[in-house]
Amino acid sequence: MFKKILIANRGEIAVRVIRACRNMGIRSVAVYSKEDAESLHVQLADQRICIGEGPARSSYLNIDQIITAALNMGCDAIHPGYGFLSENSAFARKCAENGLKFIGPEADVIDRMGNKSAARNTMMAAGVPVIPGTKEPVYTAEEGKKQAALIGYPVMIKASSGGGGKGMRQAMDEDEFEYQFNVAQRESANAFGDDAMYIEKLILKPRHVEVQVMADELGHVVSLGERDCSVQRNHQKLIEEAPSPAVNDKTRKEMSEAAVLAAKTVGYTNAGTVEFIVDQEGAFYFMEMNTRIQVEHGVTELVTGIDLVMEQIQVAMGQPLSFCQEDVVIRGHAIECRVNAEIPEMNFMPSPGKVTALHLPGGTGVRVDTALYTGYTVPSDYDSMIAKILVHAKNRDDALVKMRGVLDETLVMGIETNLDFLYRALCTDTFAKGQADTGFVERFVKGGTHDV
């Protein structure tokens, strides 16, 4: 049993983990940058320790500072949340070297699934459907162009070590390939220190569907169903829902089986998400695996009734999963909207500042994950997401009506947000019919109509 866990993160996910620790009788330690001194997670934790200046590289990405803080505070384990160091194998290894349990998969597994080219090859060998593409890393535009011609245009150029939409570019034909390849490669080198790229067939009007898996250290792997994350901008998700309206029962079963196979193939433990692309004919292909808890894990919790963060902690303590595959029953429908401090009318420009008034929605089947409070100053150094609003209802139509209502009720004053944008997106015919693909937001922004 862990006695004390350090949360190597900030914002709503840090608050989420602190609450899970509290429910399990485990003490929590919050780390924070000087800019985050007044943040909610700092106030809620049992103990707190400053680890550096505001910029992430000086604080939340500073491995040595975080490890030192955990040891000085007498912690047993570290929960990385999502983002920052959550998929950093060097951090996971450093935890192990210092006798701290990393609440996530083993470092070698993070490496295996973190490199997109290696992950694709592993999945192909295991028999998991994969989008046609290169098997080896590509380092030059000249070589990439040869591979793209063999694959067939249009193609997607991706960073081998990528994530979060960085280092990704589309090339519709040979004429634009070199430019798009060079842009993507520069982004990859700057963001990940790696210029290895890979190229795959671009699926037109795809749906982004992911399967949540949970695995213990005794070899048990369970699927908790899928989430649809197709509504996104610049590869950053905005609206997620479970179950996905894009797949039928047959595909749902096959996709879950493929996700479990993927996790077992690499010896996965703890919470993970296997992401798939679904084409217009309903065929699905492995895209990548996120080796951490996801931002959108709450929609799965609402439809399954399983607390994924508590399960993460129990698994990290060496306990078996508290459920088996037969225990997982999907009940009703859940939708999540990410509320960001940004101005959609100004190309989604960030809008940091002080929250002067705040009203969050409530009621049956409504959940809000946030670190906001009246008087809090949203900083400019970090991601612009300030809240996740989730609803659960007996079916998709009822969930959609409920979400529109709670968005209409939500009030955040002092800063600009995307609340109106989310509301209007939910009112489109395309979303209402469950037909939104990954190009939905771009068409919606350009057209601004109800029928996109």
Image (spheres, rainbow, N blue to C red):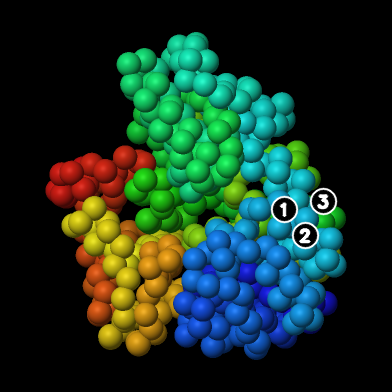
Of circles 3 and 2, the one toward us is 2
Mark 2, residue position? 94
In front: 75, or 429? 75
Quarter of the image with the C terminus in it:
top left
Of circles 1 and 3, the one toward us is 1
Q: Amino acid at mark 3?
A: Gly
Mark 3, residue position? 219
Q: Could you tell whether 78 is left or right of 41 in the image? A: right
Question: How much space separates mark 3 and mark 2, taking CA atoms?
Answer: 24 Å
Mark seen at residue 90: 1
Task: Give percent across and percent down for residue 386.
Answer: 39, 70
Quarter of the image with the N terminus in it:
bottom right
In front: 82, or 300? 82
Q: Could you tell whether 184 is left or right of 330 in the image? A: left
**Mark 1 Cα within 10 Å, few/some/many (few <14, many 20+)?**
some
Residue at 35%, 33% (x, y): give it.
205
Q: Is residue 382 visible?
A: yes
State the image quarter where residue 238 is shown. Answer: bottom left
Residue at 48%, 33% (x, y): give it.
185
